[in-house]
Image: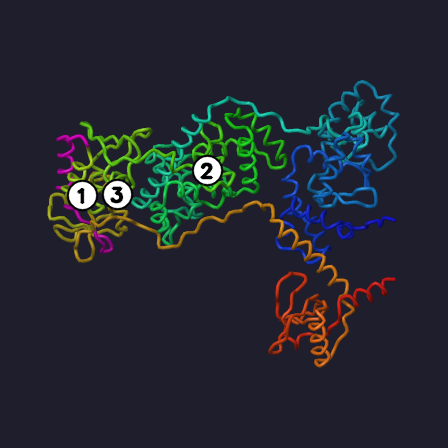
Amino acid sequence: MSTVAITFADELRARSDDDLELIFQYRPDLVSPVPNDFSSLAARATSTPSLVRALDSLNMWHYQIIEAACVLPEPFKKSELVSVTSEESTFALDYLWQMGLLYKEGNNFRTPTNLKLLIGDEPAGLGPQSSGKVDFTKLKDVPKSSADVLAKLTWGPPRGSITNIKKPGTAIGWLLDNNILVALDSHTVALPREFGIKLRQGKVHKELITTAPALTGKEVAQKQIDLAAIANISTILRWCEELLHNLSDEPPTALRTGGIGVRDLKKIAEHLGVDEACAGFVAELCYLGGLVVVDSDDQILPTSAFDIWLTKPAEERWYSLAVLWLDTSRVSGLIGKVIDKNIAPLGPELDRAGVSLIKRTTLKVLLENPKISPEMKSIQEVVKWWNPQRVNSDFIEWNLREAEWIGITGQGGISTFGSNLLNASELLGVEAALPKPVDHILIQADNSAVAPGPLTAELSAEMGTIADIESRGGATVYRFSEASIRRGLDHGKTGEQIKTFLSKTSKTPMPQPLDYLIADVAKRHGRLRVGSAHTYIRCEDEGLVQQILHDKKCEHLRLRKIASQVLVTELELPEVINELREYGYLPAAENASGVLLSQPNLRRAKSRPKPPRIISEFTAPKASVVLAAVKTIRAGERSRKVEPIVAGTSSNETLALINQYIDEQRTLVISYADNNGGVSNRIIEPISISLGTLTARDETTGEIAQFRIPRINGVAPSLTILENKADLDL
């Protein structure tokens, strides 16, 4: 004779170990941490956060079945659910029961209360349940005008607005008089759920979508996808490197909320040669990897981790960023959008729940459809079927765009490198596919230089110091200018060192205009010196001092002349230097002793890397973890049942009994006082006693633990207690 389960906890107790293992596999959050007993498991499984995660894992078909279950009066039979859905729902019903989203009461089913609240008051667009008796025969006599009103309400939303419930009009008035519509308030009427299902021909949904729609798109050869992807991988690594070097040279000041301001983001985008959306994504990627941080003085600077990252192979550098992008809950696509305020990169407003789930689902669809560059609408529909609760068309579009930038896809299709990453392959194939770095450049007559491929790390760093990147592609074009040469001088180079470097590196001779440009900038560099007084400006050329003092563009610096060759200001040294350079002067910094500061400007944050937390999804637990969880809950349940029965024993009796059970290798229950004074029963397997401490295996956790003998209030064999408990129950 079957036992009727009254509560969800009772129903869980009646499940087999195999069924419990399934609920943990389908809902991994239930084992983190493992509940103490079935009451705790039931409370966890029906809590709102856990139910939200469970609903997120459902596809469209399973979600529709849950909606149908929430529509039916409880408890409902399997046949009742099938009648409002389809015969195929039998399979879905078993799966949803195994997940713990439904539970049994005899041969019937119930849904947790919190689940109904999450689904909402109008599941599948159906209205509230009727409070009175429903008479379907009245539907045969509905006038045409009233039938038009019903047609609009049948498939939802089931509510309609009217001006005044006392004067509803002929069509609505007839429906109200015959109880086919009900008044929710003085301005709202609704179609009761029972009439809605009847008008839907006895079904809850117009169409049950049992399978995902087919993905449509353009077919692309895998070789072309991989070529595009490896170019993207090379580019994203270069963007990250250029961004961090740029932040070292000219660190922006963070907003109060911690993000990068609009103007600073625009400067970074111009430096990288990309739009601001892409620049924001690159900044976020570096932030995820702990390569950049907002320092204690609010300056945004690279961390020491950047220097370590640069020494790693390209494949390892790419993997360290790509794997974090897969799991992050931050949405770079929101950068620049105005919600309550403008959303900035590195700011706290980018987190969105469920983004990682949508991202992985999107990539899973691409993985299952290789060599396909999908149409945007098509992939949005497919992802919506897999994640009906979390779908956001913008998020899918942004995820695909970022996957292309990072090189997981190429020309829209999943790349070999992306497939290897998603399948957790040991070798990704990136290192072998990247083009070999070159160790030379070709200087042109127009003060530019062409790198015919990716430069070696050392050469790229040197070129980045003395030249600006003008265009990118298979070859990179660098442009030499007064500002770029001055930057090289600031990094400790001399004019002769720059010339020597270019002569050795270039396979073409250095043109005369570039030679003159380097010599001219080097001659003028450092004539004007800026130091801290609060800040002072000194120059042996008194004419230049007078020029700056009377320059209207410099008025806001509030300069004051204190000697024929010295000016002072209250502003900070970095700000004064940047302003003077912007107005065409070429100052150099000096220390308090007057020594020119022209060492390499490798600025790094003093703060340790503070990457944003990853709000990742729970992953399927290992089989060993699941088995241990089932054993723990069973043991905890037995401990809970015997709790009131362990009798107190004296110290001598306690020691005697424990030694006896050690010799007999019997399981026993102890009443044990914890550090806070609370007393609980513990089922243990005693091993040994030493120095007033009992060493035993705790059956609840399966781990070896130690128990202080003075804290043991009582001892009894677990089998005897269970038998006594059974006698009491009888």
Amino acid type shown at disc 3: Glu
Residue 149 position by quadrant: top right
- Looking at the image, tell me whether mark 1 or mark 2 is earlier in sequence order: 2
What is the count of numbered marks?
A: 3
Give the SS element for disc 3.
helix
Mark carried by residue 395: none
Comparing 497 with 132, the one in front is: 497
Q: CA distance from mark 3 to mark 1?
A: 12 Å
Q: Is residue 320 above or below residue 388?
A: below
Give the SS element for disc 2.
loop
Which residue: 68% across, 28% down?
A: 209
Which residue: 20% across, 36% down?
A: 505
**Residue 481 is covered by the magenta coloring:** no
- Residue named by callout 1: 548
Amino acid type shown at disc 1: Ile
Mark carried by residue 335: 2
- Residue named by callout 3: 579
Residue 208 position by quadrant: top right
Q: Which is in the foreground here, disc 3 or disc 2?
A: 2
> Quick one: label 2, few (<14), some, or many (20+) residues within 10 Å?
many
Work out whether residue 190 can be spotted. yes
Marks 2 and 1: in contact by CB < 8 Å?
Answer: no
Residue 459 position by quadrant: top left
Q: Name the side, left or right, on which 152 lies relative to 350.
A: right
Q: CA distance from mark 3 to mark 2?
A: 29 Å
Q: Is residue 168 above or below residue 524?
A: above
Comparing 213 with 515, the one in front is: 213
- Looking at the image, tell me whether mark 3 or mark 1 is earlier in sequence order: 1
Q: Which residues are magenta?
A: 507-535
Residue 183: image x %, image y %?
79, 33
